[in-house]
Amino acid sequence: MTRKISIEQFLAWLPAQEQKYELVDGQPVMMAGANQDHNDIASSGLTEFTMQLKNRPCRPIGSDSAIQIPNGNVRFPDFGVDCGPRNGKSMVTSAPAVVAEVLSPSTRFLDFNKKLDEYKSVATLKYILLIEQDWPRVHSYQRDQDMQWNIAIVEGIAAVVTMPELALTLPLAILYERIQFPFRPTLVEPK
């Protein structure tokens, strides 16, 4: 059995690595690489949050900002929002309010299961966005006042993800502006 490392040990070890890692069950786990569509979606979302959060207390976070999970894991979402005190020397967010993961075939199962459950356990998170890559659809999870999670499927290029508690929106037209979707046949009712 391999010896588990602490969050502090992981964060001290991480900057010297050439690859990206997350801390999972006490072990560094290399993250999968991303394709251009994935990167374009993530950068469009981060840019949109950056514009909307100008001169506001919350700030956008990119894929190098760590989310500390109560079970001891450390995750790196594709982008999000942190509303806690800023510590310019720390890799760890202080009060993440939004996390967004762009789904890919190699990470889809993990993102929809283990990561989603882990993110739901972070007390400060208000919104979790799981973003499809191959068609305009976002699985938007929102924590309500009773601390329960509700899901809305936001779909279609004209749709908009709303995050009223943070006065943020994420138009799918902006999120997917550089993406060319594969042809999807539509069913036509016979006449």
Image (cartoon, rainbow, N blue to C red):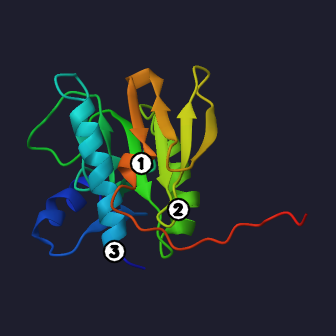
Secondary structure type for disc 1:
helix
Distance from label 2 to label 1 (Cα)? 11 Å
Residue at 48% over, 32% down? 162
* Closer to viewer: mark 3 or mark 1: 1
* Closer to viewer: mark 2 or mark 3: 2
The answer to whether residue 4 shows anywhere in this view is no
Labels 3 & 1 near each other (Cβ < 8 A) = no
- Which residue in the protein does label 1 denote? 173
Query: For the residue marked with disc 2, what is the amino acid?
Result: Trp
Residue at 28% over, 68% down? 21
Q: Is residue 145 left or right of residue 69?
A: right
For the residue carrying disc 2, how many other residues have a C-alpha within 10 Å: few (<14), some (14-19), or many (20+)? some
The x, y position of residue 8, in whole percent, is 22, 53
Residue at 21% over, 75% down? 19
Q: Is residue 121 left or right of residue 187?
A: left
Query: For the residue marked with disc 1, what is the amino acid?
Result: Ala
As drawn, the label of residue 138 is none
Out of 179 and 45, give the one closest to the viewer: 179
Earlier-in-chain disc, 2 versus 3 = 3
Indicate the quadrant containing the C terminus: top left, top right, bottom left or bottom right: bottom right
* Closer to viewer: mark 2 or mark 1: 1
Distance from label 3 to label 1 (Cα)? 20 Å
Residue at 48% over, 43% down? 128
As drawn, the label of residue 35 is 3
Query: For the residue marked with disc 3, what is the amino acid?
Result: Asn
Earlier-in-chain disc, 2 versus 1 = 2
Labels 2 & 1 near each other (Cβ < 8 A) = no
Earlier-in-chain disc, 3 versus 1 = 3
- Which residue in the protein does label 2 denote? 135
The x, y position of residue 145, in whole percent, is 57, 20
The x, y position of residue 27, in whole percent, is 36, 69
Vertical side of 56 occupied by 134: above or below: below
